[in-house]
């Protein structure tokens, strides 16, 4: 990793919490100066896909070997940003933890994160996260 490399963390890969979308997004970052850390655990098939990404992109994608709250704290403390993809999040806990540890949450503008986070605005220099619109399956024409 270089001094300008963005260290991006994610939550456990779970299909119900946007795990597939996270893997799809990370696979597109191959040529960017971004390193991605996946925590251990989550859905086994998605973890296997993350392992394939790690093999294809050594040094850019890794799976943190430990699990649990201490491992989560270590990942968040090191991360520059945290990629979240759960549109049904009703608590905003993951975004709150990212902010607590100084990482910028990248989250869907839906659920609790859409209510809890203020989208960054360069003009007014305000905000505490980067919010993105969720892609609606079958509505590619709307993008």
Image (spheres, helix red, strand yellow):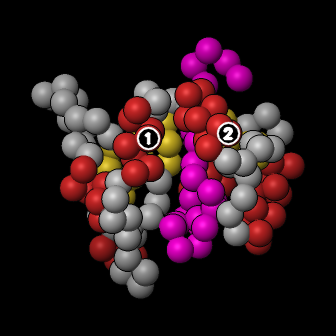
- Residue at the far left: name it: 124
Compared to residue 84, the image places residue 135 above or below, namely: below
State the residue at coordinates (63%, 32%): 74
Q: Separation of disc 1 and disc 2 at Cα? A: 13 Å
Q: Quadrant of residue 8?
A: top right
Query: Disc 1 designates what residue?
Result: 97
Q: Nearer the viewer, residue 129 or 143?
A: 129
What's the magenta region? 1-24
Where residue 63 sits: x, y (%)? 76, 46
Instruction: Classify 142 as above or below 58.
Output: below
The residue under the point 51% across, 30% down is 80
Residue with the most extreme bottom position:
138
Front-most of 98 and 52?
98
Q: Is residue 12 magenta?
A: yes
Left or right relative to 54: residue 91: left
**What's the mark number on residue 83?**
none
Q: Position of residue 19 (x, y in %)?
A: 59, 65
Q: Residue furthest front?
A: 69
Q: Which residue is mark 2?
A: 71
- Outermost residue toward the top? 3
Q: Position of residue 50 (x, y in %)?
A: 75, 57
- Image quarter of the N terminus: top right
Do the numbered discs 1 and 2 sit on residues whose CB atoms are within 8 Å?
A: no
Q: Residue at x 40, y 51 (%)?
A: 93
On the question of residue 133 being in view, the answer is: no
Q: Residues within 10 Å of mark 1 (few under 14, many from 20)?
A: some
Quadrant containing the C terminus in the rendered view: bottom left
Sequence-first tag of 1 and 2: 2
Residue 100, visible in the rendered structure: yes
The magenta stretch spans residue 21 = yes
Left or right: 84, with 87 as reference point: right
Q: Is residue 56 left or right of residue 11?
A: right
């Amino acid at each position: 990793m270089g001094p300008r490399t963005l260290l991006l963390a994610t939550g456990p890969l779970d299909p119900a919490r946007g795990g597939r979308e996270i893997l799809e997004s990370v696979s597109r970052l191959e040529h960017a100066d971004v390193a991605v850390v996946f925590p251990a655990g989550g859905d086994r098939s998605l973890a296997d896909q993350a392992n394939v990404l790690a093999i294809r992109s050594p040094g850019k994608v890794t799976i943190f070997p430990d699990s649990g709250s201490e491992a989560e704290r270590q990942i968040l403390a090191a991360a520059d940003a945290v990629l979240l993809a759960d549109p049904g999040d009703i608590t905003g806990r993951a975004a709150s933890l990212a902010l607590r540890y100084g990482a910028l949450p990248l989250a869907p503008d839906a659920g609790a994160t859409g209510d809890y986070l203020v989208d960054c605005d360069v003009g007014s220099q305000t905000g505490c996260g980067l919010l993105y619109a969720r892609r609606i399956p079958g509505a590619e024409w709307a993008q």
